[in-house]
Image (cartoon, coloured by chain):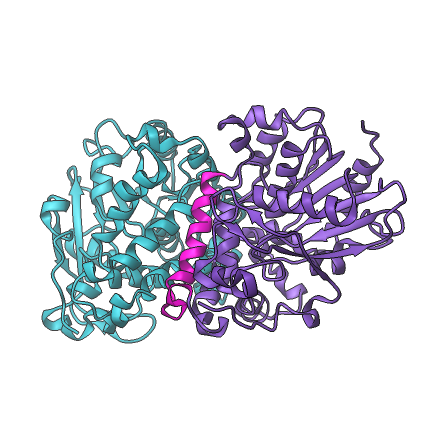
Chain colours: A cyan, B purple
């Protein structure tokens, strides 16, 4: 019932970041986080007019670190010499307030007692942080992949006057039923491990069996059938698929906190901008005034391009920009050298597009 | 360690069928089945020249019954007024010799002691049965879906002189790595259930949790993303996706025997005609002299058409006939009214094609 230590969620693994309190956050599902902290990292300099801001939001299991390492730099569209780039870690990701780290005034929310948090809660928290902490009212761009795409859409629908451009990558505004089912099997891989003890383990190590099973299910859906057929993992330095799973995908997940992952998965399952419009997805997407590039990955097995283009067709003035990557959904990791050039090209085109 | 009763594997649920012994079957992986029984059902009349035979082979978890109910009839290509149609249940499926029913002289093979059986073992057993029991030497057609496609390819490669036509539906000659990984997650869904007790449960009911988890994973990969998006299950009489899972997919699997399913899955993972040619898939497929129609289902998520056409390109004189079905792989169940007309058209075209 008390918060636990996990060395993964530290500066050692995540470099510089700041934990910023936004105070009490009341939640859509009821209850509240007494003192919600968001882990934030910034790149570049905020202009005096505060008109050069890009917000980057994080995906399931991810943190700001992948953006620092792969997406942000003077050689990228997310260029800190031109923009003030703010990466905000989602609630539950383990750097921001999350089940495993809930302590102090949040102690009653630790572990299995953590409340249900929705995508909308994240976006409300992010907006408050940007406004109160940085004085930021307008965003040149909101961008994120997967659950980050869910947050991007939520921003564009909830705060249309604040979002000038939006780039949801490999994700949807309304989570699909298929995705809901997929995520449930991922959750069950963890919760079925006796070591999980209904969320009251004392270390993620006790849930290693479940976390590894969960990782192997990512192996089935996270990449593409062609990724495995072509043996792409060999180019990444692994002799065979089991070496790749054991050396890459399993350790990626086993260091993470099970309750944190489950909090994010519950949220992922329910991402839906149509909550603003009584279930009418078209009406919700019609609220978007941001110039929007919808960016699916062609081989994505659970956010396939047709699901993304279905929504893109409902966003006024939007464009569909399909990224080609045999890695499928986990192309987001940017390990394919052809991936970032495509992302950069689309984001540069978007940032060059006049708005307003 | 002893065989157990399971009321699903009876005439009550499977109508008429005959259990035919082929005697001792030595296995590719070593060991043998002392008295291998194959459950067989036939339709139509064997011609005097024994030249009107169609062999139908079964898929994972399937039996002859789905063919009786959906595929075979005077209104279908598999027409018992013209052909003598023999459906042979695969080893391990629970009607043929399988872990849960191994008794008598097979008693030492019961439950977790069941030996590893390969696709090649099935085909050797089937060939012996057809030859010794029926005096059949030539097959107008071998047809099967999924693991039945694996057996179909194995027949065409192993016994090219006996197979005049072949129709592998929704399956491959060499199982893909992706498929191997998918099947492993299915296996883990069952074996991770504490009630499984390393295969030594006393009733499938004790493994219900694992069998249901396994069923839900079929829900993710067995249909297509569009199946769920379009709510196709509503047309099948279910209000929502959980009702469909609880009313259809979960009970489909929970009545079955876990060890039997695992024996089939181990076999499925390793289907590979290139075992005949030192790993050279092209050389193996080049042995096929049967007129072959390769029949993938367009929305199949784990035997996608491109994997099937990759192999089809290596079979001389073959044709690719893609079936359109939003149900994806489980289109095989023939619940979509548009499915069987496509299958029948392709099989009629194939049966009309002169050979030899």
Quarter placement of the C terminus of chain B:
top right
Seen from the viewer's position, the closer of residues B105 and B273 is: B105
Quarter placement of the N terminus of chain B:
bottom left
Residue drawn at point x = 82 percent, y = 32 percent: B353
Q: Where residue B192 appears, x then y in whole percent?
A: 37, 62
Magenta part of the protein: which range? B176-199
Residue drawn at point x = 69 percent, y = 31 percent: B160
- From this view, report whether residue A8 is shown above or below residue A67: below
Q: Where residue A307 appears, x then y in whole percent?
A: 51, 48
Is A276 on the left or on the right of B70, as rendered?
left
Seen from the viewer's position, the closer of residues B238 and A171 is: B238
Chief SS of the magenta region: helix
Report the number of numbered marks: 0
Residue drawn at point x = 56 percent, y = 69 percent: B255
Is A49 on the left or on the right of B262, as rendered?
left
Q: Where residue B229 appears, x then y in whole percent?
A: 56, 56
Is B192 on the left or on the right of B106, as rendered?
left
Is residue A328 in view from this perspective? yes
Q: Where residue A103 appears, x then y in whole percent?
A: 12, 69
Is residue A57 in view from this perspective? no
Residue A34 drawn in magenta: no
């Amino acid at each position: 019932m008390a918060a636990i230590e996990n060395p993964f969620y530290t500066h050692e693994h995540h470099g510089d970041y700041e934990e910023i309190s936004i105070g009490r956050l009341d939640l859509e599902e009821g209850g509240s986080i007494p003192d919600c902290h968001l882990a934030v990292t910034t790149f570049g300099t905020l202009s005096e007019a505060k008109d050069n801001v890009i917000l980057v939001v994080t995906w399931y299991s991810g943190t700001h670190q992948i953006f620092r390492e792969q997406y942000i730099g003077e050689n990228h569209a997310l260029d800190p010499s031109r923009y003030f780039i703010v990466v905000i870690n989602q609630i539950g990701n383990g750097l921001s307030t999350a089940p495993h780290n809930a302590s102090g005034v949040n102690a009653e929310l630790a572990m299995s007692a953590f409340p249900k948090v929705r995508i909308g809660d994240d976006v409300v928290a992010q907006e408050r942080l940007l406004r109160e902490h940085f004085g930021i009212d307008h965003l040149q761009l909101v961008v994120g992949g997967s659950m980050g795409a869910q947050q991007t859409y939520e921003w564009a629908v909830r705060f249309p006057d604040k979002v000038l451009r939006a780039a949801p990558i490999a994700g949807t505004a309304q989570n699909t039923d298929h995705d809901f089912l997929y995520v449930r099997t991922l959750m069950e891989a963890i919760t079925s491990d006796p070591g999980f003890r209904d969320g009251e383990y004392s270390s993620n190590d006790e849930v290693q069996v479940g976390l590894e099973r969960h990782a192997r299910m990512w192996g089935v859906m996270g990449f593409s059938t062609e990724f495995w057929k072509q043996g792409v993992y060999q180019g990444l330095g692994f002799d065979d698929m089991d070496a790749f799973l054991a050396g890459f995908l399993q350790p990626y997940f086993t260091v993470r906190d099970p309750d944190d992952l489950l909090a994010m998965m519950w949220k992922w399952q329910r991402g839906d901008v149509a909550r603003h419009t009584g279930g009418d997805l078209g009406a919700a997407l019609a609220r978007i005034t941001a110039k929007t590039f919808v960016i699916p990955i062609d081989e994505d097995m659970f956010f396939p391009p047709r699901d993304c283009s279905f929504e893109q067709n409902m966003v006024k003035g939007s464009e569909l920009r399909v990224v080609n990557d045999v890695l499928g959904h986990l192309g987001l990791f940017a390990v394919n050298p052809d991936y970032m050039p495509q992302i950069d090209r689309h984001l540069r085109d978007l940032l060059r597009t006049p708005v307003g």
